[in-house]
Image: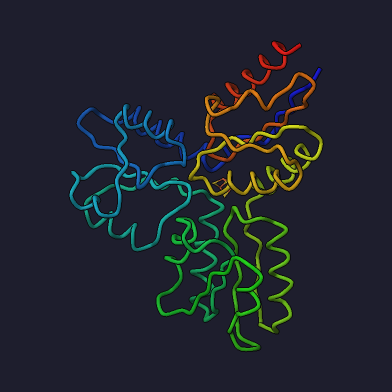
Amino acid sequence: MGKIILAKSAGFCFGVERAVKTVTDQIEKCSPDEKIYTYGPIIHNDTVVSDFEKRGAHVISEEEMASVSPGTVVIRSHGVTKKTVEDLEACGHHIVDATCPFVKKIHRLVAEYSEKGYKILIIGNENHPEVQGIIGWIVPGTEYVVIGNEKEADELHFSKGEKVCLVSQTTFNHNKFQELVEIINKKGYDMFAMSTICNATEVRQTEAAEIAAQVDVMLVIGDKNSSNSRKLFEICSNKCDNTFFIQTADDLDLSVIQSIHNIGITAGASTPQKIIEEVQKKCQQRILNKC
Ligand code: F3S
C-alpha cells in the first residue's frame, strides 16, 4: 500500500506565524470602536484574510490609507518602504510592525551600506512586495539594481572596483543565488555580499526536493499568489513528473492517486495547518478506499 510523506517544514514559517499572531492579538485586545487594518493582505492566503475581515481586521491599500478612519495598521511580514511607514503615521495611524525580523535585517543592511556609499544589488523579483519594501530603505539617490537571472547578472554594468552591497530576497532559490553570485564575483567589484535567503525557505525547498525524488505523486499546497509556493512547485516538478499545485483539498483530483502510490505533500509558507491536514486526510482516504 502506498504511503504519505508530509514535509516537516510544510506550512507557516516563523515570520508568517508571527504576523498572523500579531493580527489575532490586536483583534483580541482592541475595543469595539477601535479600527484595525492590515497594510495589504497579511499573508497570501484568501481563507486567512477573509477570516480576519470577518473578525474586524480590514485590508487597506496605499490609496486607502488617507481615506479610512485612523486606526492600528499591522505591517505584514514582507515589510514596507520607509516612506510607507512615514505616510501611514502622517495619516494618524498607529503602526504595529510585523515585518519578519529576517526582512528587517535586509532593510538595515541596505540602509547602512547605501549610507556608506555602496551601490545596492538585490537578487530577487523586482515586482515582489518584499523587494519593493527593501528598495524603499535604500538611501535616496543611491544606484541600485535588481537581478533575477544569469542574463541580468552578465549584463550588470557597475564599474570594476565599485563598492557593491549584495543581498537577496528571502525567498530566492538557494542554488540559483549561488550561480548568480559566481557570475558577479568575476566582475571585480569591491563587494559586501550576504545571502539573506531565509533558512526556512532553504529547509522547505531542500526537504521538498528530497521527498519529490522518492514519491509517485507530489502535492504542493499554496495560494496561487504565493511566490514561495510557486517556487516549491518548480523544484518538485524537476524531481517528480506528477507534481500538482493545489490551493485547498477541493482542488485535489483524486484520480491521480492510486493505492500503490507514494504521495509527498509540502506547502508554502502561507498555507494554514488546517488546509494541510485536510489534504493529508483526503489522500489517506483515497489510498484506503482504493485498497
Ligand atoms: Fe521570514 Fe523567512 Fe518567513 S524571511 S517571513 S521566516 S520565509
Q: Quarter of the image containing the C terminus?
A: top right
Q: Nearer the viewer, residue 50 or 223?
A: 223
- Judge whether 172 appears above or below 213 on screen: below
- Judge whether 197 appears above or below 111 on screen: above
Q: Quarter of the image containing the N terminus?
A: top right
Left or right for 32, reference 208: left
Question: Looking at the picture, how far across and down is residue 200, in whole percent?
Answer: 65, 45
In the orientation shown, which residue stands out farthest toward the front? 255
- Please tell me which residue is depicted at 59% across the width and 35% down the height of the picture: 221
Q: How many marks?
A: 0
- Please tell me which residue is depicted at 52% across the width and 70% down the height of the picture: 112
- Please tell me which residue is depicted at 62% across the width and 49% down the height of the picture: 231
Question: Looking at the picture, how far across and down is residue 37, in whole percent?
Answer: 31, 41
- Please tell me which residue is depicted at 74% across the width and 45% down the height of the picture: 206
Left or right for 177, reference 115: right
Question: Looking at the picture, how far across and down is residue 163, in whole percent?
Answer: 60, 82
Q: Nearer the viewer, residue 290 or 164?
A: 290
Q: Quadrant of residue 69?
A: top left
- Judge whether 202 appears above or below 279 on screen: below
